[in-house]
Amino acid sequence: MNIDGGAEMKRKFGVSFVITLMVLGLGSVSYSQGKYPDRQIQLIVPYGPGGSTDLCVRSFMGEVTKVLKQPVSIINRPGAGGLTGADAVANSKPDGYTLLATSAGVLTWGVALDPKSARELNPIAIMAVQPVMITSRTESEYKTLEDVINAAKKKPGGVSCGSSGIQSETYLDLALLEAATGVHIKHVPIASSSEGATTLLGGHIDLWVGSVSTTQNLVKAGRLRGLAVSSPKRMRDFPDVPTFAERGFPHINVNLIIVMMGPKGLPPVVIKTWEDTLGVVLARPDVAAALDKVNYDVDFQTGSERLRKYFSDEIKRFSILAKEKGIIK
Amino acid sequence: MGNLGHMLMGIVTAAQPINLLYCFLGSFIGTLIGVLPGIGPVGAIALLLPVTFHVPPLAAFIMFTGIMYGAQYGGSTTSILVNIPGEASSVMTCLDGYQMARKGRAGPALGMAAFASFIAGTIGLFGLVFLAPTLAEFGLRFGPPEYFALMAFGLTLVIYLARGSLAKALMMTAFGLILASVGLDPVSSAPRFTYGIIDLRDGIGLAQMVIGLFGVSEVLLTVEKSFTRSVFETKIKGLLPNLKDWKDSFYPTLRASVLSFLMGIIPGISVVIPTFISYSLEKRISKHPEKFGTGTIEGVAAPEAANNGACVGTMIPLLSLGIPTGASSALVLGALLIYGLHPGPLLIRESPEVFWGVIGSMYIGNAMLLLLNLPLIGIWVRVLKIPYAYLFSSIILFCLVGSYTINNSLTDMYVMILFGIVGYLMNKFDYEPVPLILALVLGPMMENAFRRSMILSDGSFLIFFIRPISGILLALVLFMLISPIFTKKRLAEEIMREADE
């Protein structure tokens, strides 16, 4: 290569350098203060692709994109049970172009367990919900919730129940049951819910508490029996499974809740736009059907202040439970 | 119509032109994804999901199986060519595959990887078709104590995997176990060794570590010597495996296919572990174990057959029970759900034509991969001819980008860089990376299994011995631990090695 290109080379280099800077600079041209949204929105899902929350969000965000006329790009930022993604959004600019779609557990039960994990996030809307179910093997002696409670009373720790772990919100339903009845059920943490289902099927544990999606096929096929479900009313797909409320435990109602949140200080126009858009999209039967395929029911709730109070009440409730159980001091 | 007839019908259904087109597309995309380290089929399929809403379900599903197989094979391609495992399941392929490439035999290595994968996939599919319900039930009998015993068995294989000093291999195993404990405690969720960094709460990622340990360190080591790799520029001796290669790999491929298929059925085993076990087994029963790691064809055939066989094995719990047991089966489940199909005991009853179409498309995907990739071997091999001065910077770039894209996280990239340096140092001081990786893969599973067993047994160790499967496995473990110690041959080897050093 001719090092001695001299002035010609320097000029060419200079020109290309300036052009490069300009091209890079174009990326940071300040965005017009036009109507929101006027460019792509990044929606962060703090869990891995293909997971429950991810599938839920992906099943209808395409429709939201159509209504907003701007792409909503779903970005997975898994880690730390949802905190990594929550952090990313909490620390981002509150301009409405970086939002979070997460399962509420990390922000309620997670905070109850570790107050340091609280993040400054603004709830925009609850979008979908999936109930939690306790299941047993069909051929086992646990045919109703009462069977479980009685067996546990007779022999504390003699009944084993698996869950995805103490830090998972599905564990809460088990913890609430123990608190309400005073029984002690042996808890076996199995992080992967599908591994939990197979461990139950294989007879190594007596019960499993987890989201409906994991066990529903097996319940429908008759291999597993649903003992109770955390939804307010009986599930359409499982008319034989009573709700905790029916059995006298109305406060055992922790479901998987998918909520959209933004960083603190979001402009009201952003919140209103999302409330309106989600309202339109989630009311459609085809969207409800798409969500149903990934085991979620539409549950559209808005009102930033109201939601904030709801989550903070849940944190209080769960903190008391955690202290009672000795999980935190 | 027996199962065989159903399967043939399924293959015919799957082989319609539109399905073949999507399969080709999927295999192509999958191979590209597999070649790029870090990005996995999971992310790709998640991204492609919306696109496929407008496509007939079976075609979309076939595309996904194409992506899955393609990624597997793409991962093997980079393992062989540049010592970067595209997936954790390609790590064992690096050992002999890369050495074969260094000797100018990249073509046969790539070819045998493709053929072994295909054979394993075919055997697996037949096993799936005829034995699925029985096997699924067998897999259920593995509870926490059985997992612990199986993982312990896997760890003792270190003895056979170690090429050099056994003491150093054991040290690496221990180091791997320590690294594996970084993260949240499985029972109490208390953070361990996270130093306040929330990204470390999930532990040290295997893929990030492996890319650094193998790929980056190899670049560092090569560049240290010179910017040319004259050993690569020897004439490429033939593009396909020759008769001797086939002879050497025939039984290893068969063994690895069957063994890994059976292991894949056990929920949660993942595809990585069978590759380790198959490789170790072949090394153990080989007539020339010392050649493993220098470029034996069976050292490529066995792990390649294993990762494909295990992949098919993981489909069994999915299709017969509706339970996904690993990343690829979870993906397949997600895809099926979106199309309104519910895998599980009901699927085969309610929509048999769908079920068999799904099986048929897996077979088509398997075959498509072979057809797609054999002609490409010539092109891949030419990549090695690129002057290393240009190639190595691309390799590093791929590693950096790849490690970032696993979780869109910079921390992962730093982990990779760190392990690249660690790998370089390890090589300098003669420590092997394979025991480290084995421990990192098996360690968490072993701990989880042990802790759960203890919870179930209220603290009694007896639980491992009174259950038949775990009892037998642990007896095997004890036997393997004791026998080398008293084997004169191994003692003699150690003595000779000490004398050499």
Image: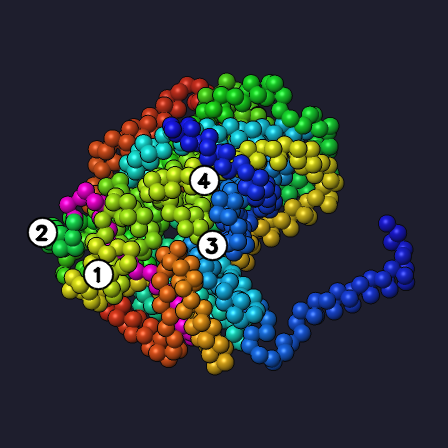
- Residue drawn at point x = 58 percent, y = 39 percent: B17
Q: Chain for mark 2?
A: A
Q: Helix or strand or loop: what does disc 2 sit on?
A: helix
Instruction: Indicate the position of residue A59 as horizontal and vertical percent values.
Output: 45, 59
Work out which residue is located at the far left of the displayed protein and give it: A154
- State which region is magenta: A121-142
Q: Chain for mark 1?
A: A
Identify the disc placed on residue B358: 4
Alpha-carbon neighbours of circle 2 within 10 Å: few (<14), some, or many (≥20)? few
Mark positioned earlier in the residue sequence (3 or 2): 3
Spatial CA span between label 2 and label 4? 48 Å
Identify the disc placed on residue A49: 3
Residue B61 colored magenta? Answer: no
Mark positioned earlier in the residue sequence (3 or 1): 3
Q: Helix or strand or loop: what does disc 1 sit on?
A: loop
Which label lies toward us, 1 or 2?
1
Kind of residue at disc 4: Val
Which label lies toward us, 3 or 1?
1
Question: Which picture quadrant has residue B130?
Answer: top left
Q: Are marks 3 and 1 in contact (CB under 8 Å)?
A: no
Q: Are marks 1 and 4 in contact (CB under 8 Å)?
A: no
